[in-house]
Image (cartoon, helix red, strand yellow):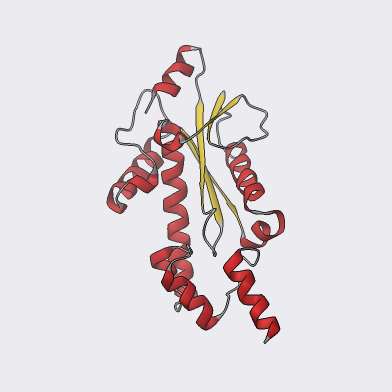
């Protein structure tokens, strides 16, 4: 997991950031990106794509990252912006913002499968969250952060089960959407939500 980082360190780079985002697929909730600069002298073992980790392992690694990384930053793009500029551009915006918010300016940025416009040299890696420790760390921070946000939102909107599906289009979520309609945190540009609003207009 550290081979990209080790190669860059061998080239003389000292601060290598990884960045990743979560929340492209959900019908509701924000999009969250994170950037992480790990400490090469304090390697965190067990980092992997956040989706491949148990909740307990993810939270344990999240705490290790927050305690031991050189710099961590988080950027959130709200539903209104996702609807306005589309989810792909919103992902780019979130990732770029998270990199620029780091307390240490990185020498190089490793990105999970997306091209960004940055004033820093960077590399996009397909399935980067399974190949780079820095990207994996960012995926964990972003995932834990967004999950917590969705659990908090489930208290405000208890009928939708956000604490379980985190806004993704599960059967239960789609059924609740059909029964109760869209909330202010639903993405109106996304198919099922858009179709619902069109049906309501027709009715």
Q: Residue furthest top?
A: 11
In this image, 29 relative to 46: left or right? right
In this image, 28 relative to 129: left or right? right
In this image, 104 relative to 70: left or right? right
In this image, 181 relative to 168: left or right? right
Tell me which residue sits at (45%, 67%) in the image: 152
Tell me which residue sits at (68%, 34%) in the image: 117
Q: Residue furthest bottom?
A: 203
User: On the rendered image, what quadrant is the N terminus found in?
Assistant: top left
Q: Is residue 32 visible?
A: yes
Q: Is residue 185 visible?
A: no
Tell me which residue sits at (62%, 72%) in the image: 195
Q: Quadrant of residue 133?
A: top left
Label tally: 0
The relative height of residue 201 versus residue 93 in the rendered view (above or below) is: below
Q: Position of residue 32 (x, y in %)?
A: 54, 51
Tell me which residue sits at (48%, 65%) in the image: 169
The relative height of residue 123 versus residue 84 in the rendered view (above or below) is: above
* Front residue (pair 66, 5): 5
Q: Position of residue 125 (x, y in %)?
A: 51, 31
User: On the rendered image, what quadrant is the C terminus found in?
Assistant: bottom right
The relative height of residue 158 versus residue 39 in the rendered view (above or below) is: below
Q: Position of residue 42 (x, y in %)?
A: 34, 27
The relative height of residue 199 versus residue 168 in the rendered view (above or below) is: below
Q: Position of residue 137 (x, y in %)?
A: 42, 38
């Amino acid at each position: 997991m550290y081979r990209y980082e080790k190669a860059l360190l061998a080239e003389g780079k000292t601060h290598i950031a990884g960045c990743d985002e979560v929340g492209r697929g959900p019908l509701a909730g924000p999009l969250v990106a994170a950037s992480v600069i790990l400490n090469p002298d304090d390697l965190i073992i067990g980092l992997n794509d956040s989706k491949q980790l148990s909740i307990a392992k993810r939270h344990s690694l999240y705490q290790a990252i927050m305690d031991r990384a050189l710099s961590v930053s988080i950027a959130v793009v709200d539903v209104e912006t996702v609807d306005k500029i589309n989810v792909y551009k919103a992902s780019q915006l979130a990732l770029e913002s998270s990199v620029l918010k780091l307390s240490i300016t990185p020498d190089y940025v490793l990105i999970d499968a997306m091209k960004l416009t940055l004033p820093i040299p960077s590399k996009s890696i397909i399935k980067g969250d399974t190949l780079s420790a820095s990207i994996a760390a960012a995926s964990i921070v972003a995932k834990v952060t967004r999950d917590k946000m969705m659990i908090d939102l489930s208290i405000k909107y208890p009928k939708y089960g956000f604490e379980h599906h985190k806004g993704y289009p599960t059967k239960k979520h789609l059924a609740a959407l059909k029964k109760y309609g869209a909330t202010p945190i639903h993405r109106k540009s996304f198919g099922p939500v858009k179709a619902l609003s069109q049906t309501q207009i027709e009715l």
